[in-house]
Structures are given as C-alpha cells and as structure tokens.
Image (cartoon, rainbow, N blue to C red):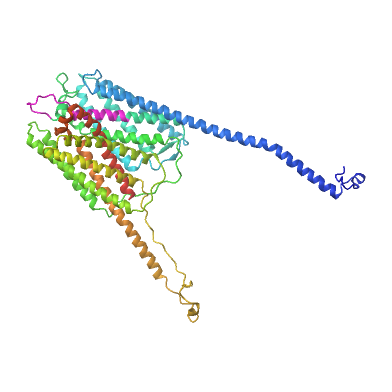
Amino acid sequence: MCYNTGHPCNCLTDGGLCEPCRMTAKDNEAEEAHLSNNINVPGQAGSTCEADLNTSSTEVVKERGRNWGWMLSGIICVNVLILGCALVSGSAYSSVNISTPDLQVFLIILLLLSSIWMIYYSIYTTRNKNAVVYKDDHAGPVWLRGGLVLFGLLSIIMDIFKIASYVGYLHCDSAVKVAFPVIQLVFIVVQTYFLWIHAKDCVQLQNNLTRCGLLLILSTNLVIWMTAVTEESLHHTTVPDYPDNVTKLSGRQTYISKASYGDDKCKCSHTSCSIFKNAYYYLYPFNIEYSLFASAMAYVMWKNVGRVASEHGHHSIKFSVKDVFLGPVLGVLLVIAGLATLIVYEMEMQKDDYDDNKKDKAVMMHFVMNIIIVTLMSISTVIGSAIYKVDHREHVTDKNPTRSLDVGLLVGASLGQFIISYFSIIAMIATGAKGYLNGLNLAWGILMVIQLGLQNFFIIEGMHREPFHEVQPVTVVANPYVLQPSKDLSSLEGTDMDTKPSPAPIALSLHSHTAEHRHKLSWKRRVLKEVSAFLLLGNILLWILPAFGARPQFDHDSETEFYNFNMWAAIVNVGLPFGIFYRMHSVASLFEVFVNS
C-alpha cells in the first residue's frame, strides 16, 4: 500500500515502503494511538470519581455514626440528671412522699452500672491494643489526678464513718442506708483507678458505647454531687421553727437534732453514733469536690473519643519552688490566720447560750478577715496581670478539650459567687447599710466581685500563654582569618599570619548578653510564680471557710430579713456550692499557671 499519493513511488512494485511512505505510516500509527488514549480517558476518570465517591460516602457514614453516638449519650445523660434532680429535690422535703432509701436505691443502680462499665472498659482496652492508639497529653495532669486520689481517700473515710453510724440503726430502719455507702465506697475505688489509668485515652474502637458509658459516669457523679450538696445545705440551713423569744440553735445543731437518724422512735444501738455522724459531715466537702473532679475528667474523655491526637506532646514542664519565697510565706501566714478565725467563729456560733454581742463580734471578725483576704488577692492579681503586659510569650494556638473545659468551668463556677455577692450588695444598698456589720458586708461583696473578675482574667491569660523556655548559652568559635571590614589589606602585609587573634572577647560578649537576657526572663518568672503561689493558697483558704461550716449569710440577718428566709436560702444553696467548687478549680488552674511560669 502506498501512502505517498502526491508523488507516486515504487512501493507497489517493490513490495517494501519507501522513506516518505514509512514516515507517513508512523504518523498514522501515532494518531491512532492518541485517539485510542482519548477514548479510554473517560473510563479512567469515571473510576477516579467512583473512588472519590466511595471515600466521601465512608466519611459521611462515620460522621453520622459519630453524631448518633453523641446524641444517644447526651439523651442518656440528660434523662439521668433530670430524674436524679427530681428524686433529690423530692427527698429533701418531709412533706413529699419520697424517702431517703428511695433515692439511695436509684443511686445504687447508677453506681453499679457505672462500675460494671468501667471494669469492662479497662479489660477491653487492655486486651485490644488497637482500642487506644492516641493519648491526649493535656488531659488528666498529674496534679489533677493526685487531687482526685486525695479526695477519693477522704470520701472513702466518710463512707466508713457512715457505715459505722448507720449500722447502729439497722434494727429499726432500712438496710438500704447501710448498703449505699458500701457500694459507693467500691465505686470510688473503681473510678479512681479507672481515671488514673485511662484519663488520657483517645478511644478508636466501640466509640458509641464508650460515649454512652462515659456520660453515664458523668451523670452519676453529678447526681451524687447534687445529693451531697442538698444534704450539706440542709445541714446548715434548716428553717428555724423557734419563736422570736426562744434561744436559737445553730444550723448544724438544728439539723443533727432533726436528721433522719436519731429521732425518738429509732435509737442507736451503740454509743458512738453521734461521734461518727458529726465526723462524716465534716468530710462532705471532699466528697463533693471528688464528684466534680471525676465529672470533669469523664467529660474530657468523652470529648476525646475518636479523636486523633497530634504526635508531638506538650512541653516537658517540671515543678520547682526555687527562687519563690514571698508568695508562699505570705500565703501560709494568711491561711493560718484564716483557720484561727474560722475556729473562733465556729466555736462562738455553736454555743448553746445565744449572746448577741459575742456573735456579732464573731461575724465582724469573719467579715474583716474575708475583706483582708480578697483585698490582698486583688492587689497581687493586678501585679500579675501587669506582668502579662510586658511578657512577650506567645499565646497557645492549638485547641484541646481540656483547656476549653477549664476555662468554661472557671467562668461558669464563678457565677455562683457572683450571684451571692450581687444579691448581698443590693440588699445592703436598699437597706442603707446601717451599722458596722452591714457596712463590712457591703465592702466584702464589692471586693469579692472585683477579685473574681481580676482572678478570672489572670488565670485564663496564664493558661493561654506558652511556657517559659530556658535560653541556652551559644558557643561561638571565632575565625582568626576573617578580616574586619574596617581594616585595610595593606595593613596586614607586614604582620605575621601565624599570630591568631584571641576569640575570648567575642565569646565573653555573647555570654554576657545571654546572661542579661536570662536575668530579664527570671524576674518576670519570679513575680508570676510569687503571685500564683499566693493566689493558690488564698483560694485554698476561701475554699476551707465555707466548705467547713462558715455561713455568715445566715448568721447575719440582713439578707434574710430583706429577701425572707426561703428565698435567701435558695440563693445561697444554689450559688455557694458553685462558689466552693470555683475556689478548688482555681487552685488547680493556678497550679498549672505556676508550673508554666
């Protein structure tokens, strides 16, 4: 076949292709190959599109499963909390036909279910190595877990005292009241081990079941917290039923005399009941804090379910009290003075003979002590906040659920103390703040509002700053053959090239600059550490005072008369537990700020 139609050749006669025909044949083959490739391209594009569609559909299915797990676990948590709140509220009033054993049966069921799930989770993650591939380095720091263990041990002691006290009433009361502290003790042991080992887990298998189990633990701890807070509130704020001309009883004495145990119909079978009863009421604050700590850690684990954490861990930070002196010393002195004030105040309030003058002096002493505490803390917070203005550390850019939860809890819990302070301020202003006690109460309320705002800013700003880093001295080796720009080449002609200039001046200059830079960093760090240590001890004191019985809100009658007892008791009983938790949460946050500084 001849391809050269324009110029005929001998291809047909010779049987072979001449050069022009051979080139034309190659061009035709290339064109056919190009056409065949173009025909096959739509098939390849189709296969690529199918792969993309399969990938996107898989992601959609995973996203739907994740949303379904969040929704289901949220529904379980909300229902448990609402049911628990209804039972706790109903059991708090004698007029409602919900007894304490009814509530405790519900709590026993929650405790058993939570304990069984935690044991199952521990066994499953231990046997399946792919269940937990990633760890959240920010979750469950050692000081938080240490606080959980401490509060857990004190809660166990509380349960032991409860068991010892309740056993004396088995002959005339329900056995559920003995079974509940026994099961709660087992739950505390299991949960403390569970959170100590698994607080950093980012679970990748059985995500929906894990989400439901973690929110069951969270809701169980919150219901226990509500129960303990309600008992503690009734412990201090039983409505007085005495006439005006009869000697008053303090809140604690009134509650103990009207508690569910110890009435005329049911007598304790041994003589130590009253001792154990008084003892475990002083341990309630630790059990309350334990439940809140466990709830916060369970929430962080719930947020980390299915999360792919970054490979690089956070900075290695060591706890050190080196070069920190003034803040801890002043803080310890303040705590000692506050504890002495609390002891005198409590002893005066619990006396059987009601002397108005002595009790007013005790309340005045308590007000003055609190004013001194919040004033010193406000001044130190202003100093620390001013250091942040000259501190050039970068802000943390990565997001993690632990820090977000810390900030949310800090701001949310402070609202409880804000509510009490503002209601007290309004009552004092409306009544004209007549008398020295009302004036001190007004000053305390205003200073408390200022201190809360300043401290929230200081803690949140400190938690969002990168940790300080040590600047290592740089070793510089001078090259003796490098010419200085100011020198002329002709000036080196007559010199001995074997004579090398000493590099010591250069190295000395750089080392002195580094030392100066480190000195500038050290004074900022020292001031921040001093402020953080003082605020930490101050918050411990402000946690101890209300947690162990100081109730000037009821021992001073102005707010009670202005709002009436029931309304003011509701305000205090709702706001004060959050205020107490705020102080303990501030201690943990300030410890983190101290370490990062």
Image quadrant in which the N terminus is located: top right
Outermost right residue: 13
Tell me if residue 244 is in the magenta stretch.
yes
Residue 221 lies in quadrant: top left
Outermost bottom residue: 494
On screen, 389 above or below 189?
A: below
> Which of the pair 129/594 is nearer the observer?
594
Q: Residue at the spot x=7%, y=36% of the render?
A: 357
Residue 551 visible to an observer of this rendering: no
Residue 321, position as x, y percentages in the image: 28, 51
Residue 279 visible to an observer of this rendering: yes
Q: Is residue 229 left or right of residue 64?
A: left
Residue 139 lies in quadrant: top left
Q: Is residue 22 left or right of residue 138?
A: right
Residue 522, position as x, y percentages in the image: 31, 56
Q: Is residue 273 left or right of residue 352?
A: right
Q: Residue at the spot x=42%, y=30% of the render?
A: 70
> Which of the pair 377/233 is nearer the observer?
377
Residue stretch in magenta? 221-249
Residue 74, position as x, y percentages in the image: 39, 28
> Which of the pair 273/505 is nearer the observer?
505
Q: How many marks?
A: 0
Residue 553, position as x, y percentages in the image: 17, 34
Residue 456 lies in quadrant: top left
